[in-house]
Image (cartoon, helix red, strand yellow):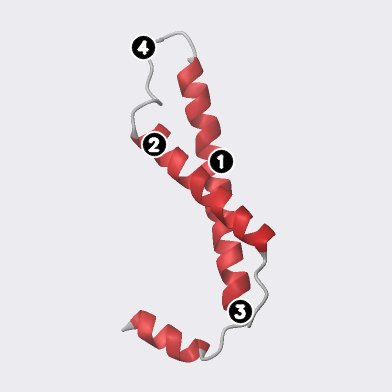
Amino acid sequence: MKKRSSNIELLRIISMLLIISTHLFVVGGVRYSDYSDGISRNEFIAQIMGLGGKLGNTIFIVITGYFGINAKNINEKILKLIN
C-alpha cells in the first residue's frame, strides 16, 4: 500500500480551486467594466484571478507529471490515450 502525500494532494485541490475561480471570474463577465478612464476594482480582481488560474494550471500539470512518471506500463497508457 502506498503512502499518500497529503500536502501534494492539498496543493492539487488548491490549484483546482484557482482554475475554477478563474473560469467563474473571467468567463462569468466580471472582467468588463463601465469605467472608461481606468481599471475598475472588478477588472483588477479578474486579472489577479486570471494569473491565479494560470499558476493553478501549471501546478496541476507538474503534480500530474510527478505522479505519472513512476507509473507502470506508461507505454500502454499512452497508446490508450492516442487511440
Q: Sequence order check: which comes first, mark 2 or mark 3? A: 2
Q: Which residue is mark 4?
A: 34
Q: Sequence order check: which comes first, mark 2 or mark 4? A: 2
Q: Residue at x 40, y 10 (%)?
A: 36
How far apart in space, not on screen, are marks 3 and 4 (Cα)? 48 Å
Are circles 3 and 4 on residues that touch, CB within 8 Å? no
Q: Amino acid at mark 4?
A: Asp
Front residue of 9 and 34: 9
Q: Which mark is residue 24?
A: 2
Q: Which residue is mark 1?
A: 52
How far apart in space, not on screen, are marks 1 and 2 (Cα)? 12 Å
- Image quarter of the C terminus: bottom left
Q: Which residue is mark 3?
A: 69
Q: Sequence order check: which comes first, mark 1 or mark 2? A: 2
Q: Nearer the viewer, mark 3 or mark 4?
A: 3
Q: Position of residue 56 (x, y in %)?
A: 55, 49
Decide if residue 26 is on the left or right side of residue 48: left
Q: Residue at x 38, y 17 (%)?
A: 33
Relative to residue 71, is residue 35 depicted above or below? above
Q: Amino acid at mark 3?
A: Ile
Q: Nearer the viewer, mark 1 or mark 4?
A: 1
